[in-house]
Amino acid sequence: MNENQAVAKFILDNVGGSDNVVSATHCMTRLRLKLKDLNLANRNNLDQNPNIISTQIAEERLQVIIGTQVGDVYEEFVKLINHVEEVKEETTKDKNVFNRFAALITKIVVPSLGVLCACGIIAGINSILLSTGVIVAGDGTNILLSNLGNACLTFFPVILGYTSAVAFGMDPFIGMILGAFIIFPNMAQTINDGDPLFTIFANSPLAMPVYKTFFGIPIIFPAVGYTSTVIPIMLINYIASKIEKLLKKVLPRVTRQFMVPFFTILFAGVIGVLVVGPVSMMIQNLLQAGLNVLINTSKVLAFAVISLIYQPLVIFGLHWPLITLGLLEFGSLGSTLIVASIFPASFAHMAACFAVFLKSKNIKTKNVAFPAFLSACFCIIEPSIYGVTLPVKKRFGFCMVGGLVGGLVLALSNSPMYAISMGVTGVMSFINPNGQGGFAGLLWAIVACLVAMVITFSLTYVTYKEEKVEA
């Protein structure tokens, strides 16, 4: 029995056995278990296991924080319980709408995080090479790196088409087709060609011109299309999942293989463009308008709130709606100040972990602090939160202070990110690919991260007491 198998069996033995497990999922660091009876879980035993960082109850689920090897443990765990990832929990839904929405966003966005960050790093490398004159705009190297760096967000609806279909319990290939449909090449240009027939909500932030109709029904399609968008494909696939489920009930079994995808794609695609598209545009416009009002009223207050709430939200795995708002901003503007304002948070946790590693004389504490430090380098801060900072609450507070100051430095210097990438490699995302501003954004990002680290490291190192950790 290898280590992952042993950890999986240990977890199963301490959550009441396979009969008590309703479903099992995982994110980047946590094994999320839906249990019939949470009281059967022996959290004390789980917390004592050296391969488990901590446990947490959130969204009526037991979250076992393991670290970056959670995927391997999950695979072994699933083999033991003979369950697959369960997404159809109609009878056990959380009554809290916000919790359900946050859990859904997590299921949809988290699987794409690896490629999202990878493409962001490539985009950052391309920006550095352009800014330093190593390559020039339009040469072969620039074209290849630029396309690789932008591929994920350009075709993001296709990726989310797959992940959201899985989250809604639908055929993922139907989800991918619907994602590809809404970003079909030149569709935005052809639909919005010519003079508008009329404008809905004219002279308001919600103004939407209509150029074409579908059998007399207005087609409202954004001029920039749905490339890099998040909300539309989620809503379209939600409707598609309902259509697919209904069709499987009413169509003869012999026709389902072809007729279910045919009708699902046809109906969901048309409804998506005619109804979901305009609604999502209105939601996005309202969110952006609200954010602009808050920023125009008090930019300091707006980004102070964003920087402050991010880390507490991570504790419960509820931070993805905030990141999604940043992705909406990125899709609309080509850059994001929202994600930039939370960028220094992981550096604050790096500093806290490193301070504890240096100051502690306890071998077990050092063995927790250093891997947590390495994880934080790549913006995986859950090991730091549960293993190093949250056990001593003021230490978590120091991280919040460091993240707040660093976030405000970037917000007030107006230094957005031009690619979505976090951790030490993410600093390259602050270089404007258009060449405007030179390395100003990068320099401000470095300053912000250093400030966050100095503040957090100093407070943690000076106030560190070994007995607090032992307690």
Image: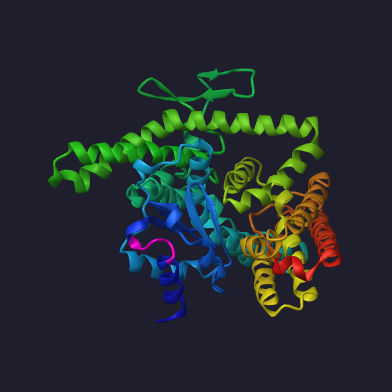
Instruction: Name the quarter where the C terminus is drawn.
Output: bottom right
The residue that appears at 72% across and 52% down in the rendered structure is 434
Does 283 sit above or below residue 360? Answer: above
Instruction: Name the quarter where the N terminus is drawn.
Output: bottom left
The residue that appears at 56% across and 31% down in the rendered structure is 283
Q: Position of residue 39 (x, y in %)?
A: 45, 54
User: Is 189 left, or right, of 20 in this rendering?
Assistant: right
Q: Picture quarter containing residue 168? A: top left
Q: Position of residue 174 (x, y in %)?
A: 34, 47
The one nearer the camera, 64 or 347, is 64
Q: Position of residue 163 (x, y in %)?
A: 43, 52
Residue placed furthest toward the bottom: 1
Q: Position of residue 176 (x, y in %)?
A: 39, 49
Q: Can residue 260 be seen from the camera position used here?
A: yes
Would you say residue 16 sits in the magenta stretch? yes
The one nearer the camera, 181 or 46, is 46
The one nearer the camera, 39 or 243, is 39
Q: Picture quarter containing residue 467? A: bottom right
Instruction: Please name the predominant secondary structure of the magenta segment in the image.
Output: loop
Residues in magenta?
A: 14-18
Does 97 sit above or below residue 45? Answer: above
Would you say residue 139 sits in the magenta stretch? no
Q: Can residue 155 be seen from the camera position used here?
A: no
